[in-house]
Image: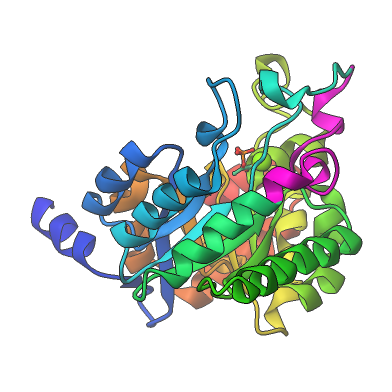
Amino acid sequence: SQRTEAAIREEAVETVDGREVEVAANVGTPAELGPAAERGADGVGLFRTEFLFLDRESAPGEEEQYETYREAIETFPDGRVVVRTLDVGGDKPVPYLDLPDEENPFLGERGIRRSLGPDSDLFETQLRALLRADADTDTGSLAVMLPLVTTVEEVAEAKAVVDEAVDALESEGVDASVPEFGVMVETPAAAFMADELVEHVDFFSIGTNDLAQYVMAAERGNDAVAELGDFRQPAVLRAIDATTSAAAGADVWVGMCGEMAGDPELTELLVGLGLTELSMSAVTVPAVKARVTETDTDAARALAENALAAASKDEVIELLE
Ligand code: PEP
Ligand code: MG
């Protein structure tokens, strides 16, 4: 009912048996922050920062970015804000970045690969703006997240850049804080290596849009292979399970920020797979929150076990019905 939904909006939700699940919003521009809070998002699980860099002649400077990140953190004084570092390359043209013309952009210089390569200056500026914004908002809790990670070296290298940025700011007498540090699991390599990556991070966030694309070798957005790239493919579920299982023994939380997280029909399955944070487009936050409150963890685990044992997508769909 309306009343229940309004009540649910106000607060954090938990399962029937008392397990808290954070329900956060994906945000692509500052204009989406307010509406996300109004819909009851506990925080931002994915702040895509590409908008800052698109449709302009040159990259935004540290101050401009600082203001934007500060606004995001201040919109959610009680919640976490996960900001993803720049994820350009491949299919998104940015004239001043001189992106290469690639035959397979989805397999080329994207995300963290560019941040540790040709865009290292931008990466440093972005990190400085983030660390300052976090330090200057005393209620905020910022998390920095890397896109398209495939190797442990990338994570270690990026963490070193974060640490260097903290040191540099401190030596300049500027306040900087050390944010939570995590990676997106959106490549098969990251899922396979999750038990090693877990040593280097505070959290994982599963990006099912790219993960399904790469696991199933089915381009996202290509209707001809959409059925193959379905999140309910057992191969996709097993990649998710590899990630949550790796984190289970460590002090690392696992969220999901791909489109899969916003489907209320899949909430029970995702809780059963061990996700403790779900981030989605703000419109679906109330429905997913409601589903969490109806979920029993034991039943959800049983559902997940069965889904992981399924031989086909159709079997998974049957289990969900
Ligand atoms: C994803 O890949 O699932 C994701 C959340 O990132 P994006 O859609 O921005 O690639
Ligand atoms: Mg992605």
Question: Above or below — where is 1 with respect to 213?
Answer: below
Q: Is residue 104 left or right of residue 300?
A: right
Q: Nearer the viewer, residue 309 or 92?
A: 92
- Total labels drawn: 0
Q: Is residue 177 left or right of residue 120?
A: left
Residue 146 colored magenta? no
Tell me the quadrant of ligand 2: top right
> For the magenta stretch, what is the residue range?
103-123
Residue 6: quarter of image: bottom left
Q: Which residue does the image show at 79% across and 52% down from the upper left? A: 149
Q: Which residue does the image show at 61% across and 50% down from the upper left? A: 126
Q: Position of residue 269 (x, y in %)?
A: 55, 59
Q: Nearer the viewer, residue 181 or 192?
A: 181
Residue 117 colored magenta? yes
Question: Above or below — where is 66 with respect to 160?
Answer: above
Q: Position of residue 55 (x, y in %)?
A: 53, 20
Asked if residue 300 shows in the view, the reply is yes
Question: Above or below — where is 110 with respect to 131?
Answer: above
Question: Above or below — where is 199 with respect to 85?
Answer: below
Residue 109: quarter of image: top right
Q: Position of residue 81 (x, y in %)?
A: 45, 61
Query: Residue furthest toward the front?
Result: 172
Q: Which residue does the image show at 75% across and 42% down from the upper left? A: 312
Asked if residue 262 shows in the view, the reply is no
The colour scheme is: rainbow
Query: Residue furthest toward the left?
Result: 3
Q: Nearer the viewer, residue 278 or 82?
A: 82
Q: Is residue 286 left or right of residue 204?
A: left
Q: Which residue does the image show at 62% across and 65% down from the upper left? A: 273
Q: Is residue 197 left or right of residue 289?
A: right
Q: Position of residue 36 (x, y in %)?
A: 31, 48
